[in-house]
Amino acid sequence: MRNCTRHIGRLGTGLVLLALLFSCSDPNAQAPTENQVHGSGWDSAHGALSVADPFGCTSCHGTDYTGSGGAVSCYSCHYDGPPFSAHPANWTSPFTDHRAYVNANGFSSCSLSACHGASPFVGGGLTAPSCGTADYTNNSGSTFTCHAGHISGPNWLLPAAHVADAINDITRCWTCHALTAPSPIPAATTCRVCHAASDPFMVQGSCSSCHNNPPDGNGPAGNVRPNRSGEHNRHVNGEGFGCATCHQGFGSDTLGHWYPDPLTPADVQFAATIAMTYDGTNCNGTCHGKNHNPESW
């Protein structure tokens, strides 16, 4: 009888241990992370839950929602409330009101991982789209046109692209860029990175925002810009020729003209319609009705 009791006791202990083992084998995906009250993904879920039970938050976040103990203040993310919304309470529409807010306050309050993302023009956040999204459909089914980014790469930097766009509406550029550092968007370059001599003149065909005037190859434009001495002045200002007349493929609206920064002078390369040759020192032939045999540079 005593042995039977001993075996039953051992069996019971084993069953208890087995039950404990299996009860701990499957983790609860909704369980809070270490040292946290809420589980993962709470940033995107807490909005709807707080609207359904706003007073359920006060036991931790304080009766006035300003934080209590280790619980943060709701106002560290929300700027008005309660009831709290993602945007300030005085906004009648995020679509119409956000531009004035950003112009006055910058992007810092938008650049949160739980909102538009740490970099608001790249990728978006947990609950809001990237500011660079072409269009966005909200939870009510309304679609809005947003800030679709311009084309990227060297071709956007051509005068026919970004210059024409800036002349049309320079305020669109100020959303991301600035004349000098810092830009509203840290990753966005400033105008003076390229326009080293002076601020852009908002007119196509002006050389003086990149080249010194008169061009001498010195600062502030930098000595990588060419010294257009010799016969440049007579041909450009006297005859009215552009760079591409003698430097085919290197006109002011071509990538070869400036991208990447040319470290050597552009080679003389005439169009097929011009009966001219150049040996590095002298021009020979006829151009614009004038004989150049031989004309030294």
Image: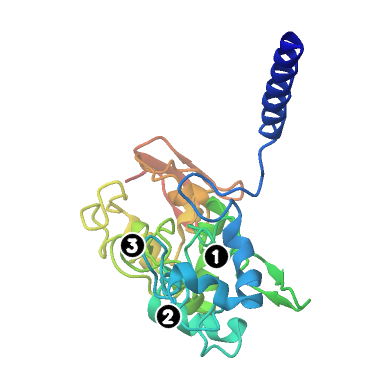
- Which element type, helix, strand or loop, lies under badge 1? loop
Q: Amino acid type of disc 2?
A: Asp
Q: Amino acid type of disc 3?
A: Arg
Query: Which is more toward the observer, 91 or 9?
Result: 9
Q: Is residue 86 visible?
A: no
Q: Nearer the viewer, mark 1 or mark 3?
A: 1
Residue 23 lies, in percent from the top left, at 70, 34
Q: Is residue 288 left or right of residue 239?
A: right
Q: Residue at x 43, y 50 (%)?
A: 258
Residue 143 image-quadrant placement: bottom right
Residue 209 lies, in percent from the top left, at 34, 66
Q: Residue at x 66, y 45 (%)?
A: 29
Vertical placement of 8 versus 147: above or below?
A: above
Which residue is the extreme one toward the left? 219
Residue on which the image places disc 3: 192
In primary-sequence order, the first of circles 1 and 3 is 1
The answer to whether mark 2 and mark 3 are in CB contact below 8 A is no
Q: How many marks?
A: 3
Dot label at residue 115: 1
Q: Residues within 10 Å of mark 2 (few under 14, many from 20)?
A: few
In primary-sequence order, the first of circles 1 and 2 is 2
Q: Amino acid type of disc 1?
A: Cys
Residue on which the image places disc 2: 64
Q: Residue at x 51, y 55 (%)?
A: 37
Residue 176 lies, in percent from the top left, at 46, 67
The answer to whether mark 1 and mark 2 are in CB contact below 8 A is no
Give the CA separation, mark 2 to mark 3.
48 Å
- Which element type, helix, strand or loop, lies under badge 2? loop
In primary-sequence order, the first of circles 2 and 3 is 2
Q: Is residue 132 left or right of residue 221?
A: right
Q: Residues within 10 Å of mark 3 (few under 14, many from 20)?
A: some
